[in-house]
Amino acid sequence: MPSGNLGSVLTIDQAIHDKIVAHARRDHPDEACGVVAGPAGTDRPTRFVPMLNAARSPTFYEFDSADLLALYREMDARDEEPAVIYHSHTATEAYPSRTDVTLAQEPAAHYVLVSTRDPDTVEFRSFRIVDGTVAEEPVRLVSPVGH
Amino acid sequence: MAIEVRIPTILRSYTGGAKSVEAKGDSLAALVDDLDASHPGLKGRLVTEDGALHRFVNVYVNDEDVRFTGALETTLSDGDSVTILPAVAGGACRTVPPAAARR
């Protein structure tokens, strides 16, 4: 698997990975979306925040604008950034579409795509999208020590 | 007149890295022009050639999305705060739908 730009990798708790997949399955056939916030500057996704898809569409997602403001205010107050921005594709592969690439406006985020096209298969992939360029990165699932 | 404008990460290259800048204007349109005068190129990231706010840039005046307050014609007063946030959106579709109604 290509390692993307500058050896970028998504390191994420298995539990959060599972929550993202569960959210996507729950909202199927609409696209699900959300973020995983993390302490600013650490590149660690720690706080799972599922969001309403205001578009409620099987092929488009958009955070409700009031929800978006509340989310960014909250992250600001907690000194967090959106380490992961995730959404699902419900009939196509877990790969950023042209629309995904055009609308990606958080260059430091890991863009996670989940596909729910097959109920028996988990497709969970991560990408960096910077200046219109997509680079897939490996996903490293971790479990907290002592839990 | 001083209005605080919060700048998202992706537009901080126009403000020398500043998260927040001050600007003035009686309307959002005037404020955007004032911002552009101090930070050239910023207007082009907020307003299209047709003179409308970009579909995927959200602007809030005192926590209210300006789509519901008159968009660029939203009036501003001293002490107001303006927040700019890029929309978080995407999806498998080829064509992008218009903005969703307020829920």
Image (cartoon, coloured by chain):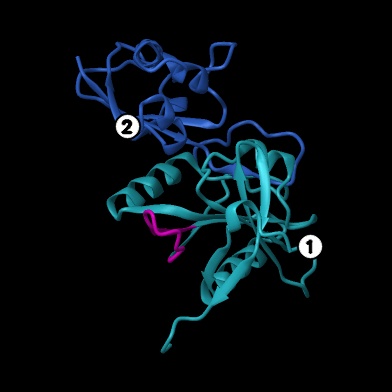
Chain colours: A cyan, B blue
Image position, residue A70 (x, y; %): 37, 46
For the residue labelled by badge 2, is the local secondary structure a helix, a strand or a loop? loop
What residue does disc 1 label?
A: A117
Chain under disc 1:
A
Residue bounds of the magenta highlight: A36-46
Image position, residue A121 (x, y; %): 77, 73
Residue shown at 44% from the left, 63% from the top: A44
What residue does disc 2 label?
A: B18
Mark 1 is on which residue type? Arg
Image position, residue A7 (x, y; %): 59, 58
Residue shown at 52% from the left, 50% from the top: A109
For the residue carrying disc 2, how many other residues have a C-alpha within 10 Å: few (<14), some (14-19), or many (20+)? Answer: some
> Could you tell whether B66 is left or right of A87 in the image?
left
Magenta span contains residue A38: yes
Q: Quadrant of the rendered structure where residue B55 is?
A: top right
Image position, residue A77 (x, y; %): 28, 51
Count the numbered circles shown.
Answer: 2
> Does residue A10 lie above or below A97 as drawn?
below
Mark 2 is on which residue type? Ala
Q: Nearer the viewer, mark 2 or mark 1?
A: 2
The label shown at residue B52 is: none
> Does residue B83 lie above or below B103 as drawn?
above
